[in-house]
Image (spheres, rainbow, N blue to C red):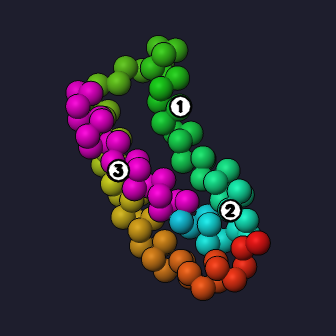
């Protein structure tokens, strides 16, 4: 089960975080703000981690697969939005 989480959900989360950072950086004026706002992506993962530690639920194979499917759908949406939103020239001229 952990192999599935590490080798499937892990790369999907990396794609999600890169796309989110790209979208945030195209909308803000400073790189520091983009870095700080991009940390929001990790909050759902931390909720799962602390939920399991507290005993609220048990992470099993079905939950990992469901999580991976949801993240894959979010990745597809984020790639679409990031491609439409990203404007390199605007970022280069607007950032200080």
Look at the numbered disc 2 and give the secondary structure of its residue: helix
Distance (Cα) linking label 2 and label 3: 24 Å
Q: Which residues are magenta?
A: 1-21
Q: What separation in Å lies between label 3 and label 1 (alpha carbons)?
A: 17 Å
Identify which residue, 76 or 90, lies in the foreground: 90
Determine crowd level at label 3: few under 14, some 14-19, many 20+ residues with C-alpha closer than 10 A.
many
User: Could you tell whether 35 is left or right of 29 in the image?
Assistant: left
The numbered dot on residue 31 is 2
Q: Secondary structure at mark 1?
A: helix
Which quarter of the figure is the C terminus placed in?
Answer: bottom right
Q: Residue at x 47, y 26 (%)?
A: 49
Magenta: main secondary structure equals helix
Check the picture and name the quadrant holding the N terminus.
Answer: top left
Residue labelled with disc 1: 47
**Residue in view at x 56 percent, y 67 percent:** 23
Residue that label 3 marks: 12
Q: Earlier in the sequence, mark 3 or mark 1?
A: 3
- Mark 2 and mark 3 lie on one chain; the one further toward the N terminus is 3
């Amino acid at each position: 089960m952990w192999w599935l989480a590490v080798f499937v959900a892990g790369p999907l989360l990396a794609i999600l975080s890169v796309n989110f950072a790209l979208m945030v950086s195209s909308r803000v004026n400073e790189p520091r703000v983009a870095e700080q706002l991009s940390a929001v992506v990790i909050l759902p993962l931390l909720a799962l981690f602390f939920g399991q530690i507290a005993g609220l639920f048990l992470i099993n194979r079905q939950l990992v697969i469901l999580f991976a499917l949801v993240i894959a759908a979010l990745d597809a949406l984020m790639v679409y939005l990031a491609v439409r939103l990203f404007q390199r020239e605007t970022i280069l001229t607007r950032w200080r």
